[in-house]
């Protein structure tokens, strides 16, 4: 009998719609494509946009990387973790 009550409680809990959490506007940021600050670096075939942080300093940062047609990077390593999106 107690198994039936527990099973019913679990099913009711799963069927109940989840409450939507309100987003904190201070914690959410977005940029439209025309607002992304693309910059050409040392390699003229690559454009980058730093979205968060500073790649020249320790710590987390996010960079978008746009490779132009025909340009490719050889396999290489970085001394720290990176979060790069190649477009």
Image: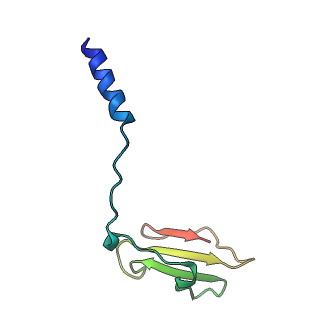
Q: Nearer the viewer, residue 87 or 82?
A: 87
Q: Residue furthest right?
A: 70
Left or right, 61 with reference to 85: left
Is 22 drawn above or below residue 57 in the view shown? above
**Residue at 36%, 80% in the rendered image:** 57
The quadrant of the image that shows the N terminus is top left
Left or right, 9 with reference to 73: left
Q: Position of residue 44 (x, y in %)?
A: 65, 88
**Residue at 37%, 34% in the rendered image:** 14
Q: Nearer the viewer, residue 3 or 72?
A: 3
Q: Position of residue 25 (x, y in %)?
A: 34, 71
Left or right, 84 with reference to 27: right
Is 41 drawn above or below residue 16 in the view shown? below
**Residue at 55%, 69% in the rendered image:** 85
Q: Position of residue 69 (x, y in %)?
A: 74, 77
The quadrant of the image that shows the C terminus is bottom right
Q: Residue furthest left?
A: 2
Q: Residue furthest top?
A: 1
Q: Nearer the viewer, residue 27 or 11?
A: 11
């Amino acid at each position: 009998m107690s198994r039936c009550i527990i099973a019913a409680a679990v099913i009711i809990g799963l069927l109940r719609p989840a409450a939507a959490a309100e987003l904190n506007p201070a914690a959410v940021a977005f940029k439209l494509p025309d607002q992304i600050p693309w910059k050409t670096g040392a390699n003229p075939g690559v454009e980058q946009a730093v979205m968060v942080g500073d790649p020249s300093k320790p710590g987390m940062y996010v960079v978008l990387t746009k490779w132009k047609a025909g340009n490719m990077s050889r396999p290489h390593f970085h001394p720290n973790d990176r979060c790069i999106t190649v477009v």
